[in-house]
Amino acid sequence: MVTDRYAILFLPAIIRSEHDSSLDALVALDLPRGEAMDLTVAGWGGAPLAILAAVDGGRPVAAVPLPDGRWAACNTYPDEAAETRSEAERRLRKLLKRGRRGLVAEARTLLRE
């Protein structure tokens, strides 16, 4: 029997807006509502991790849970993903410019053998 193995990665993310639900955050990122609903439902019941997607020809985005229960609609940088939160925070600091707010998103990724 083959079982999937997963790892947690930490992604720098720039906050575009905040919303009451992951669905609202994904729709704000220009995902079609049906796709946003599918992604939201797929994440139910698990740990509150970022919901990753791609829009506009592959632009990486995510709905990221916030500590207060709201969700952030974010642009993400998968090329800057790190195995530790501290490394992702260091990379995020390089991406932040005047007036931008950012955070480190936790996401689950499938390990390839």
Image: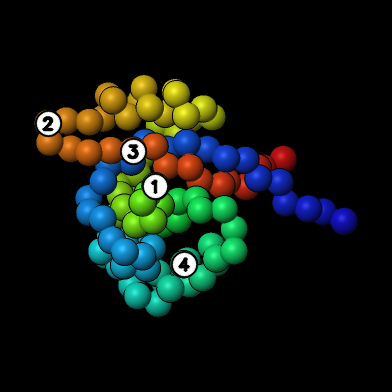
Task: Residue type at mark 3: give it.
Answer: Leu
Q: Crowding at label 2, few (<14), some or many (≥20) Cα neighbours within 10 Å?
A: few
Q: Crowding at label 3, few (<14), some or many (≥20) Cα neighbours within 10 Å?
A: many
On screen, residue 16 versus residue 7, left or right, reads: left
Q: Which residue is mark 4?
A: 40
Q: Quadrant of the N terminus?
A: bottom right
Question: How far across and how far down the image is residue 39, in percent?
Answer: 47, 66
Disc number placed over residue 103 in the picture, else none: 3
* Mark 1 vs mark 3, CA separation in Å: 11 Å
Q: Which residue is mark 1?
A: 67
Question: How far across and how far down the image is residue 112, in percent?
Answer: 67, 42
Q: Is residue 64 visible?
A: no
* Mark 4 vs mark 2, CA separation in Å: 32 Å
Find numbered disc 2 in the image and state the secondary structure of the residue it sits on. Answer: loop
Residue drawn at 25 percent across, 64 percent down: 28
* Mark 3 vs mark 2, CA separation in Å: 15 Å
Residue drawn at 27 percent across, 24 percent down: 94
Find numbered disc 4 in the image and state the secondary structure of the residue it sits on. Answer: helix
Disc number placed over residue 98 in the picture, else none: 2
